[in-house]
Amino acid sequence: MADERPPAREAGRGNGECPAGAFARRSFLQGAVAGLAGATGASLLGSDPALADKASGDNASPRPIPFHGYHQAGIATPPQTIGTFAAFDVTASGRGELTDLFRTLTVRARFLIAGGTPEKAPSSSPPPDTGILGPEAVPDDLTITLALGATLFDDRYGLADRKPVQLITMAPFLHDDLDAALSHGDLLVQICAGHRDTTVRAILDILAHTNGAMRPRWRVNAQRNPPRPVGTPRDWFGFKDGIANPDTTNTARMNQLVWVQPHTPEPAWTAGGTYQVIRIVHFNLEKWQHVPLAQQERIFGRRKDSGAPMYALSENASDTLDPIYTNDPQGLITPLNSHIRLANPQTPQTASTSAILRRSYDYDRSPDVHGNLDMGHAFCCFQRELDTYITMQNRLEGELLVPFISPRGGGYFFALPGVRNDQDYYARGLLT
Ligand code: HEM
């Protein structure tokens, strides 16, 4: 498979106008920190190219990624540089408040993604916007992607019979060391953008407007590294990571691998959504640094410098070459327990459980109490069936990489179908 990350995304802009839901109005009246109204179309950056170009002087994209669609953005969207994964416990007191929460989240996402001029307030009042992006907020490729955990379908909101059929709370795998404080949640909000200040403004805005209806549970800030020197970016192990990924511009392939289809055993409202897995995987980099290069390459099954498969001898071989195992049944070239060979063994028996859409980020957190680095992967993947991930992960429990990683958190979620238009809101199909 090639590095199929598609070229620049389509130009266009979201629409910032939508009536706020009842919950948003209540937050507003209660004087929650913010109180932003949706941006008006006229004030959006991107509507005036001259203004947009001026505002994007720091190379932040002036054109919003479209918010409305059959699918949410942030899944097939080429990964932005900055990512935040924030999980929440929902505290809304009933179905009505839960619906208000999703309406409010829709209004905030629509507004934040579009960019534009935040509402002004008299200087005697708290500013309605954090001001982090200045007086004209540039869109900066922001996407906000919502996904639901299995616990949202317990007896609190009467949604049990509408749960996606494969959605469960993540159980520990053989080598997991899960920390409850870093795991699970009723709701996952994935926020991606070109710059960290854009994601921070978004999370602060969302928190201010949903205060009382959901409570932060865990959050991981992460990034994607630039290509070094070209091609797919490298992870903290120094390997090009994300090469063999489905082509997100191939609709048939995405429908087959990622998007839940209508008229399946899944509840009708799930069509257009997808299962999302987050795994917060600590890397033991101190130990990794003592591993000889040849062994590192055998652990992953690809060359470190070039990213090419193990059969490639040239230093300049392309990272887009496919690994081939038909001439290597014993794993002499690509070990049978290397990462890529267990993830995708290329056998008839594993054909249906060997392809997922990976969209991971790299995190760097404070050292632990023993002074050990806490760096690793916010591993993120999307697939039409959660069982595909679970089967693949179970195979990987036998990989050579195991001594160098420690999965500590994350969870299973169902990423909602897209918000279709101005009248629609997140999870409407589930809640009505
Ligand atoms: C968290 C630590 C992980 C690291 C550092 C890592 C790194 C890599 C690297 C360097 C590659 C080879 C280049 C590429 O094709 O992208 C790769 C491939 C791949 N990884 Fe991972 N990965 C990790 C976790 C996972 C997990 C948890 C899964 C799924 C359960 C997974 C599934 C895959 C798949 C499907 C491939 C492509 C295999 C192929 O078709 O050749 N990885 N990974």
Image: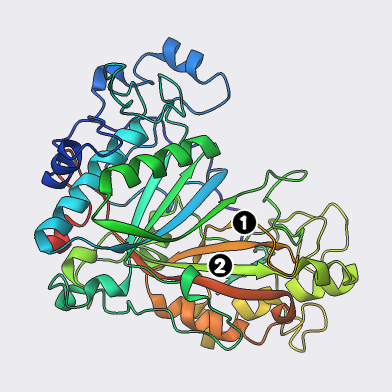
Residue lying at 59% horizontally and 75% vertically, measured from the top left: 407
Say whether mark 1 is within 8 Å of ligand 1: no
The image shows residue 106 at horizontal and vertical percentages of 24, 45
- Could you say which is closer to the camera, residue 94 or residue 336? 94
- Could you say which is closer to the camera, residue 97 or residue 141? 97
Residue lying at 50% horizontally and 55% vertically, measured from the top left: 247
- Could you say which is closer to the camera, residue 163 or residue 97? 97
Where ligand 1 lies, by quadrant? bottom right
The image shows residue 373 at horizontal and vertical percentages of 73, 63
Q: Quadrant of the C terminus?
A: bottom left
The image shows residue 146 at horizontal and vertical percentages of 33, 55
Quadrant hosting residue 125: top left
Whether the residues at callouts 2 and 1 have beta carbons within 8 Å, the answer is yes
Quadrant hosting residue 277: bottom left
Report which residue position mark 1 lands on.
Answer: 363
Q: From this view, report whether residue 12 is shown above or below residue 356.
A: above
**Residue pushed farthest top?**
50
Report which residue position mark 2 lands on.
Answer: 280
Quadrant hosting residue 18: top left
Q: From this view, report whether residue 86 is shown above or below residue 80.
A: below
Residue lying at 23% horizontally and 23% vertically, measured from the top left: 40
Say whether mark 2 is within 8 Å of ligand 1: no
Lower position in the chain sequence, tag 2 or tag 1? 2
**In the visual, does 221 lie left or right of 376?**
left
Judging from the image, what secondary structure is the residue with disc 1 in? strand
Q: Is residue 16 visible in this depiction of the protein?
A: yes
Q: In which quarter of the image is the N terminus?
A: bottom right
**In the visual, does 233 lie left or right of 249?**
right
Q: From this view, report whether residue 147 is shown above or below residue 53.
A: below
